[in-house]
Image (cartoon, coloured by chain):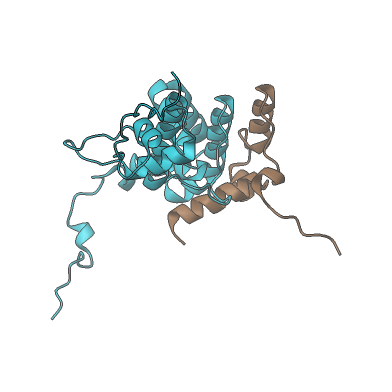
Chain colours: A cyan, B brown
C-alpha cells in the first residue's frame, strides 16, 4: 500500500502561520510602487545591474531574467504571484533599456534561438587558431596545417612533430628516406 | 502552462500594448509607469521604442 507522502488535510493549521514571507500580506499592492522598488534595486545596486547585464551578454533572454527577478520578489513576500504577472512587462522593459543603454542586443525570449556554441565548436576554433598561427610562422597553407593538427600526437610524453620539417622532407610521419651524398661526376676521358 | 510561460505571455502582452485596465479601474488612478513612459525614457536615452517588428508579431492582413 502506498504511503501518503504529502501533508494531511488541515496540517497547515497545526503549524505556526507567518513562518514565510509569502504567508504574510504582500509588501506591494500598487503597481507603480512595486516598479519603483524593482527599479531602485536594479539601478541602485551596481552588483545587481552588473550581474544582470552579464547574464544578458552571455545569452540569457530578458524573459528569463525577468522571471528570476519577479520570482525573487514572490519569495521575499514583496508581491503575490498574480501581481508578478502584471509586473513582468514593466520589469522586462527596464531590463531591455538597461541592456540597450549598455550597447547589448538583448533577446526578448520568444525569437528563434541563436545557435549556442558547443564544446566541439570551441575545440575546432582552437584548432583553426593554432593552425593559422603555425601557418603564418611556417608559410604552409592552413589546410595542410589543419590536417597536421589532426595527426598531432597527444599526451605528455608524446613528441611533437615539426610540421615544417615533415612537409619539406615528405614521407610518412615526418621520416624521410635518406638521400645519398652527391657523387662527383665520373671522368670519361674528357679533358680537364 | 508553467509560471515561466505565463511570465513570457505577460511580457509579450505588455509589449503588444495591453495594460492592466481592471487594476487601474479598481485603484481609480492612472498607472504612471506604463509602456509609453518607458518608451519616452528610452527615446530620451537614444533607444528606439520596441515595435512589432522587434517583437516578431505578424499583423494579420486585412482582406
Could you say which quadrant of the image residue A97 lies in? top right
Judge by depth and name the residue closer to the eye, A157 or B60: A157
Label count reads 0
Could you say which quadrant of the image residue A18 lies in? top left
Give the vertical position of B44 relative to A91 (above or below): above
Quadrant where the image shows the N terminus of chain A: bottom left
Q: Position of residue A47 (x, y in %)?
A: 38, 24
> Residue furthest toward the right?
B63
Judge by depth and name the residue closer to the eye, A82 or B51: B51
At 43% from the left and 35% from the top, the residue drawn is: A55
Q: Position of residue A36 (x, y in %)?
A: 51, 29
> Residue furthest toward the bottom?
A1
Quadrant where the image shows the C terminus of chain A: top left
Give the vertical position of A62 relative to A33 (above or below): below
Q: In this view of the protein, can residue B20 be seen by the observer?
A: no
Q: In this view of the protein, can residue A126 be seen by the observer?
A: yes
Judge by depth and name the residue closer to the eye, A1 or A59: A59
Q: Position of residue A42 (x, y in %)?
A: 46, 28
Looking at the image, residue A126 sits to the left or right of residue A36; the answer is left
Looking at the image, residue A158 sits to the left or right of residue A188; the answer is left
At 34% from the left and 39% from the top, the residue drawn is: A76
Q: Position of residue B61 (x, y in %)?
A: 81, 59
Amino acid at each position: 500500500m502506498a504511503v501518503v507522502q504529502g501533508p494531511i488535510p488541515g496540517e497547515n493549521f497545526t503549524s505556526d502561520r507567518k513562518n514565510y514571507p509569502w504567508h504574510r500580506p504582500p509588501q506591494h499592492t500598487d503597481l507603480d510602487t512595486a516598479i519603483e522598488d524593482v527599479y531602485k534595486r536594479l539601478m541602485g545596486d551596481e552588483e545587481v545591474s552588473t550581474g544582470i547585464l552579464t547574464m544578458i551578454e552571455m545569452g540569457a533572454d530578458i524573459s528569463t531574467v525577468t522571471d528570476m527577478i519577479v520570482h525573487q520578489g514572490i519569495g521575499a513576500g514583496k508581491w503575490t504571484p498574480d501581481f508578478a504577472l502584471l509586473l513582468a512587462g514593466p520589469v522586462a522593459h527596464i531590463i531591455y533599456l538597461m541592456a540597450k543603454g549598455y550597447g547589448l542586443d538583448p533577446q526578448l525570449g520568444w525569437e528563434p534561438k541563436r545557435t549556442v556554441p558547443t564544446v566541439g565548436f570551441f575545440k575546432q576554433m582552437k584548432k583553426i587558431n593554432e593552425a593559422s598561427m603555425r601557418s603564418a610562422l611556417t608559410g604552409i597553407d592552413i589546410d595542410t596545417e589543419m590536417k597536421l593538427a589532426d595527426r598531432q600526437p597527444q599526451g605528455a610524453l608524446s613528441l611533437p612533430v615539426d610540421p615544417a620539417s615533415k612537409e619539406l622532407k615528405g614521407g610518412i610521419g615526418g621520416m624521410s628516406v635518406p638521400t645519398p651524398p652527391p657523387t662527383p661526376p665520373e671522368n670519361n676521358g674528357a679533358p680537364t | 502552462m508553467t509560471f515561466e510561460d505565463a511570465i513570457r505571455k505577460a511580457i509579450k502582452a505588455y509589449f503588444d500594448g495591453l495594460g492592466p485596465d481592471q487594476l487601474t479601474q479598481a485603484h481609480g488612478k492612472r498607472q504612471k509607469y506604463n509602456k509609453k513612459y518607458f518608451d519616452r525614457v528610452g527615446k530620451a536615452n537614444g533607444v528606439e521604442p520596441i515595435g512589432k517588428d522587434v517583437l516578431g508579431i505578424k499583423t494579420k492582413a486585412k482582406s
